[in-house]
Amino acid sequence: MTRSWLARGSLAALGVALATRAGMVLAEAEKKTSVKQRAPVARIRSEGYTGHEVCGSCHQDIHKAWSESAHARSVTDPGFQAGVAESVTKYGEDAKRLCLTCHAPTTFVTHATNLRDPLVREGITCDFCHTVKSVDLSRADNPFEIVVGPVKYGPFEYAPSPAHQTALSVLHRNKPTLCAGCHEYSTVGGFPALTTYSEWTQGPYPALGVSCQDCHMALVQGSTAREDVKIREEGSYRFINLHRLVGGGSQGQLRRGVDLNVVAAEARGDSGIVEVEIVNSAAGHKVPTGLPSKQLVLTVRALAGGKETFSERRVYERKVVDGKGQLLRSDGDLFMAASREESDTRIAPQEKRRESFRFPLPSGTMQAEITLEYRYAPPGAEAPRVLVLAHEVRDLRRR
């Protein structure tokens, strides 16, 4: 089985100032250092992958954030487990192997496929990302150059450790290609099933120097390692990249990325008029991105005396079909059977989408309720997961 790899974008638009400031802070942090005595530590494995708990014994702040991330739950998540089971039933064990190359990418090296394997269950774990030396997007089956062993790659030029060797990696500092292998995917037939990176490349942010890490791994206060094991002092700066990797599953991140502006909510003759503008103001890719089973939904309802008199919904989504023209909603079907894009109404970076609604307006006062939601129905879920991004109620009076 082959696969095609590109790279991914980010929930972006913090701008050049953020990217520049991040680089300055990292550079300044490297300068204000001095060598110190340190406590003994447990060393990482010289061969094979080291488990996340060993990493967390020193890198406590980073490990805590990662432990709360979707990366840490990428295999144990019930939706993923249900999706794998469904895909294996339909397509066989090849489907599981394909899923694990992104959800447990250590399997590129170990070739493990047992979902109960301890390393597999770590998902996108510390030692995978920090043993990636480079990424070659032209390599279809595996874009990562992985060097498992004592050297760990990261964003600091001078980061001595008593537990392992370190190497500066610009890739880890600010290159979208670090995320490349898993967040854009083409099927065996060449259909681009996931398009997050291409959405980013077609937007304004590459020219501004804003990458995935600037928004999904922004600098936050924290310590890179326990004070008693550090070889160097960090001076007055204490920053780490946020390893919680907030994304589409975060209501706060979505609210920062998308704005809902009510342009008009008024009576015009015997009609109620609602005009709204949805702006992808801070996402570096389309909203929603990723799986076509994700939707952005705008709903306008009219209420008179507490009773609904009107309801209309606009859905922003990407519809994908198989070779027979059947609409695909299953995540597993997307990766194994997607053949053609039927439509794409998602909102591109910096795009403004104007929507108008008209409904009968009786005498007296009524209300217009305007709601913007993010919806995702993961495999095995009884109902879609719904995140409310904006909700407004406006009074309308017919004169």
Image (tube, helix red, strand yellow):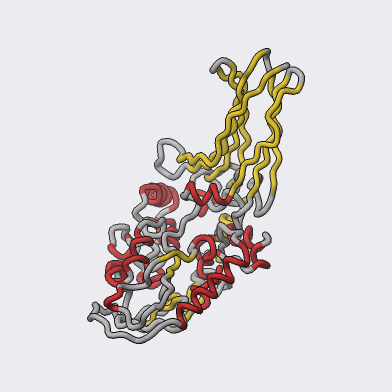
Is residue 166 visible in the rendered image? The answer is: no
> Residue at the right extreme?
269
In this rendering, would 345 be left or right of 296? right
Up-down relation of residue 3 to residue 269 (above or below): below
Horizontal side, residue 267 vs residue 19: left or right: right
Q: Nearer the viewer, residue 196 or 351?
A: 351
The tally of labels here is 0
Seen at 31% across and 65% down, the residue is 119
Residue 84 image point, x, y percent: 40, 52
Question: Residue at position x 72%, y 21% from top?
Answer: 271
In the rendered image of this protein, does residue 147 appear above or below residue 276?
A: below
Q: Is residue 280 visible?
A: yes
Residue 40 lies, in percent from the top left, at 23, 81
Query: Quarter of the image holding residue 111?
Result: bottom left
- Quadrant in the picture for residue 222: bottom left
Nearest the eye: 36 or 361: 36
Q: Position of residue 110 (x, y in %)?
A: 35, 71
